[in-house]
Amino acid sequence: MPGDRRQLIIGAARRLFTSRPYDQVTTSEIAKDAGVAYGLIAHHFENKRGLYLAVTNEIATEIAMVHLTPPPADAPPVDALRHALRNHISYIDSHPDSFVALLRGALGADPEHRAAIDRLRWLGARRVLAALGIAETVPAVLRTAMCGWVGYLDEMMIDRITHRDIEVEALVELATSALLATLRTVATLDASITFPVELHEAWQHSGEPWPADR
């Protein structure tokens, strides 16, 4: 079946692209590993770049579709955030090579590859906002802050994969503390944004007042 052969090629390319640099992988090698005729790569993907983009899109889709077990029904927003972060870290820990290939791939400047990463990061940002009880239209300053925070989390995950010397709970607390500090600044910059009262309380527990409660 054509679809089966296409997926065989993607599977072989994914194994090779996540184990070696892009420039060291050839399409003939991918075809041999997949057990298909070389011409099928051009037929399905046009060229090596097209195949690489298909692989990175598959990885991004898998991360986006990962099942997040819900937190306890009565969990306050900050605990729900910690729960979502543990889910995310657990998934990345299970697919470290794919995650690194997606973020640090050789086509990092390619607009299609960049767009796939941006879509994935924004999906993650919206999931976090939902976990915190913030489901309204996202104002510009909050959008910018969340994009920056998700990039920060991604880089911490890369560091964890590289060095393997930081525990999950330490990473969860680093990410949680950074987000609370970021949201406090957002609240200062845009008083029209309504945050759940539990976030105000979480920041107050850290020893600093939340900007004027609304």
Image: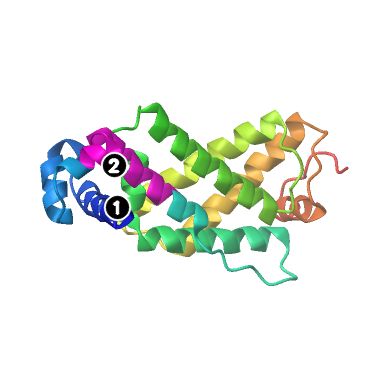
Which quadrant holds residue 166? bottom left
Residue 131, visible in the rendered structure: yes
Circle 2 is placed at which residue position?
Answer: 44
Q: Nearer the viewer, residue 192 or 46?
A: 46
Q: Quadrant of the N terminus?
A: bottom left
Residue 205 position within the rendered picture, expressed as x and y whole percent measured from the top left = 72, 56
Crowd around label 1: few <14 · some 14–19 · many ≥20 (10 Å): few
Residue 150, visible in the rendered structure: no
Question: Residue reaching furthest right?
Answer: 214
Amino acid type of disc 1? Answer: Pro
Mark linked to residue 2: 1
Residue 125 position within the rendered picture, expressed as x and y whole percent measured from the top left = 59, 45
Q: Nearer the viewer, residue 13 or 41?
A: 41
Compared with 37, 65 (above or below) is below
Q: CA distance from mark 2 to mark 1?
A: 9 Å
Specify the segment rendered in magenta. Answer: 41-60
Q: Is residue 178 left or right of residue 197?
A: left
Residue at image x 78%, y 50%? 200
Q: Say which label, 2 or 1, has the lower sequence index.
A: 1
Q: Nearer the viewer, residue 128 or 164?
A: 128
Q: In the image, which is nearer the foreground, mark 2 or mark 1?
A: 1
Residue at image x 36%, y 50%? 99
Amino acid type of disc 2? Answer: His
Residue at image x 44%, y 55%? 62
